[in-house]
Amino acid sequence: MCDPSISMQELAHLLTMSGLEVEDCQPLAAAFSGVVVAQIISVEKHPNADKLSVCRVDAGNGMLQIVCGAPNVRPGMKAPLARVGARLAGKDGTPIEIAAAKMRGIESQGMLCSGRELGLSQDHSGLLDLPAEAPIGRDLREQLALADQVITINLTPNRADCLSVLGVAREVAALSGAKLITPEIVPVAPTGKARHPIRISDASGCGRFSGRVIRGVNAAAPTPEWMRQRLERAGQRSISALVDVTNYVMLELGRPLHVYDLDKLRGPIDARFGRKGERLKLLNEQEVEVDETVLCIADDSGPIGLAGIMGGDSTKAEVTTRNIFLESAFFFPEVIAGRARRFNFASDAAHRFERGVDFDNNLDGIERATRLILDLCGGEAGPTEDIVARLPERNAVRMRAARARRVIGVAISGNEMSDIFGRLRLPFRREGSGESEAFLVTPPSYRFDIRIEEDLIEEVARVYGFERIPAHPPRAAATMGAAAEGRRTLHELRARLAACDYHEVVNFSFVEPQWEEDLSGQANPIRLLNPIASQLSVMRSSLIGGLVANLRHNATRKLPRIRVFEIGRAFLRAPQLEDGALTVAGIEQPLRIAGAAFGPAVDEQWGVPTRAVDFFDVKADLEALLAPIACRFEAASHPAFHPGRSARVLTGDAAAGGRAIGWIGELHPKWQQKYELPQSAVLFEVDAAAIMVIRIPRPEVPSKFPAVIRDRAVVVDNFVPAQALLDAMGQHQRSIVKEVRIFDVYQGSNVPKGQKSIAFRVVMQDTERTLTDVEADQACDELVEALGRRYSATIRN
């Protein structure tokens, strides 16, 4: 259809730079020479080998004796023969030269070849069987037209017009200036009067429906070699003559077709939406249930196919079929999109219809397929029926020439823009001049991607050539903005965790439902309508599940010490929007920071005894992450953690109860066993927004006077948390008390049963004078008295 006078590499580069990415460009066959078409005259058993045969072969210049081990070798067969001196491509690409050799005492004057030995296929079950009409002695590369190149194009979803040879040829002609030769489609005059009634009940789904009856076909007729070759080189497997014709027209013109067995139809063919409860068995033997959102092709018996996706098994054409009905229809893309994925399969027709198929080539597809069917299978064609209910509107799109130049950054003349639209075969009208110059372009029936002005600007830019657009550095003055002192970035938080020996991981936001139920207590998480894998079917409400999977993955690979963290969003059904969260369609997406530690507390060394990481090691890491934000830890239960070794993380005023920002704890033993961890792990998860805002540091004059330190030990009930004692002392401490910290907890002799001894150190200092012992003792005693009043604490003797 188009033969540009450029090399294959230049063509591939031209297509890629215009938006049709060439993914691969390879010769059709491996490099070989000296291989010809030969005919096997006779076959005899090898006298010294059960699995070998001795063949007399006619290669066009006399008889040759060939020893062959192929099971399908037979007299009269035509097969490729590598003569003595021929060169074949080896497995590693190194050429192999064929020489005369003795095989079990019998001389062989060449080699009969399979498809794999020639690099034409992976089939090595027998010799490559060549057509009976292949001339003896002809070079195999000429016989099989192996000079072809196979170009694989990775199309973007908007370029449905290029899902055919004709579509790509149109592009090549526009880009290279070469002449486009479209296939000449001559209408086939009907030779019979057979018709089958058709109707469109739902014009919102089916805009046009065409069809034709062909009677007396031979469905068992073989597909000719030229068609089978072209289909296979385009990635389509040859099935039968009727199916091959519809696939051929689809690849050639971009027009999906379908063939029905006319004798299996029950009443008129109708394009309508499905009805609840209707079921259908498809050509792939999958049984599906349709509803009011699925467009179907039906007859009086019910649905006989999914419109634009796949036909039904009940009306399929088989080798015994004698009378057929050929369908060519236009279905609106929005009606087809997503339906095949809903039923968990894909088809070539659905891939095209959901992107947009030319609604003006229905009859061209019918006529082209009719001609091929009559040539291959014979038969008598009836008149073509064509019902047009509703077609997409093609409104003219206005492109301002001045704006196109501004967006592209190049002063492209109006004449050059006119030439580009002409080469692209886009009907247009030019109006105005100078700054008011504009083009009114009417998209053709096969272009569904041209809707707004920017689409036309893109067409001008890509045909003009992206490589011709000069690259200029930005001219805007760049100013360095001041960093907000009261807010830290995620990068700073990452750096803090990295300094604590944690490695960052990035996990999927969609996880296994069991993770959510086990580790987050979510029995009804947010489910995905179209998961990429059946096990990854819900959105995570916590980052803990992914980190447990990371620990298991690395622990099974014998890593003794693992520290990982992740910064990512969780997905919750929540009515309120918290700071730093995103809300989409009623779903809250808070940003979280989570970490996990497993294995020894420190790497093995001579200076520190080896011990497993515990709650307090990770608590120290979390405090380092939060600093300078003061945090508190309150014992509480979490589905993922050990009941007695987990805590809620709080920040803010202790008197007000604090604000809960996350959790920390040791993994529950049952989850440790279920997820196959050899030892326990400690994890934490906090809201990122809560720790990104910090107070601006304020300068303070350091005291010139020495600090006074007092230690006190009090006895309280076991159930009293240490944090509660610190909170109580914080509410009653004098201004001279600078710090109160716990340094010892004791249970045992000299302490009553059911109680514990907690020792704390009080640091006192004044900025104007040295404190006396009396002042220090009074301040310290006030703290102890406050504990006695609230928690019945007594001084330990």
Image (spheres, rainbow, N blue to C red):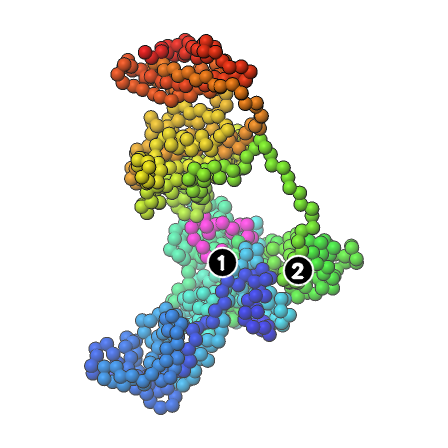
The numbered mark, 1 or 2, whose residue comes first in the sequence reads: 1
x 47%, y 65%: residue: 247
Q: Which residue is mark 2?
A: 469
Q: Nearer the viewer, residue 722 or 85?
A: 722
Residue 179 spot, x, y in % from top left: 63, 72
Q: CA distance from mark 1 to mark 2?
A: 38 Å
Above or below, 319 against 793 in this view is below
Q: Residues within 10 Å of mark 1 (few under 14, many from 20)?
A: many
311 in magenta: no
Whether residue 212 sits left or right of residue 448 in the image: it is left
Q: Nearer the viewer, residue 217 or 148?
A: 148
The reply to whether residue 109 is visible in this rendering is: yes
- Under mark 2, the amino acid is Ile
Residue 61 spot, x, y in % from top left: 38, 90
Quarter holding the N terminus?
bottom right
Magenta range is 327-350
x 48%, y 52%: residue: 296
User: Which of the labelled discs sits on residue 126, or is there none?
Assistant: none
Helix, strand or loop under label 2: loop
The reply to whether residue 184 is visible in this rendering is: no
Q: Which residue is mark 1?
A: 349
x 50%, y 20%: residue: 653
In terms of image quadrants, where is residue 209?
bottom right
Residue 58 spot, x, y in % from top left: 35, 87
Q: Nearer the viewer, residue 140 or 7?
A: 7
Residue with the most extreme bottom position: 62
